[in-house]
Amino acid sequence: MPTARAHLNGLLLAEADSWEKVEGNVYFPPSSIKDQTIFTKSDTKTFCPWKGDAEYYTIKSGDQNVQDAAWYYANPYEKATNIKDHIAFYKSKVSVTVE
């Protein structure tokens, strides 16, 4: 499997040789996150009818906070258990590549 990487302003956020792809989004396993300290849980939550409730992270990059740049499913529905706690990034906010 190719390597997936997520970058924000040149900072490597996540890197994984094993990941999940759902609806065009790469879901990185929690162990692939390079620096957990720059991820802060936000109050934002959304709902997907087949995955369940998504929770969001704001990511700190230098002096900038990128609001709700990433999301995850802590308690996904049965059809989405393969992405439990995996983190996906908004492509408009974070560069995600697969090579």
Image (cartoon, helix red, strand yellow):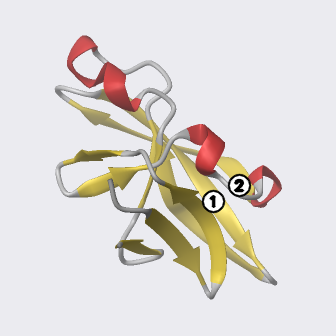
Tell whether 47 sits left or right of 14.
Answer: left
Q: Position of residue 6 (x, y in %)?
A: 51, 69
Answer above or below: position of 15 versus 8: above
> On the image, numbered disc 1 is attached to which residue?
58
Splitting the image into 4 quarters, where does residue 63 fall? bottom right
Circle 1/circle 2 CB separation < 8 Å: yes
SS class, disc 2: strand
| Identity, as a three-letter code, of the amino acid under mark 1 | Thr
Q: Residue at x 58, y 60 (%)?
A: 14
Q: Name the residue at 17% across, 50% down.
A: 23
Relative side of 13 to 85, left or right: right
For label 1, the SS is: strand
Q: Position of residue 41 (x, y in %)?
A: 67, 45
Farthest residue to the top: give it: 78
Residue 45 lies in what quarter of the image?
A: top left
**Residue 70 vertical placement versus 59 (above, below):** above
Q: Which residue is mark 2?
A: 39
Q: Residue at x 44, y 31 (%)?
A: 73
Q: Which residue type does callout 2 highlight?
A: Phe
- For residue 75, what is the image quadrant? top left
**C-alpha gap between disc 1 and disc 2:** 6 Å
Between 19 and 40, the residue placed more toward the observer is 19
Residue 99 % position (x, y): 35, 73
Q: How many marks?
A: 2
* Image vertical order of residue 72 relative to residue 4, above or below: above
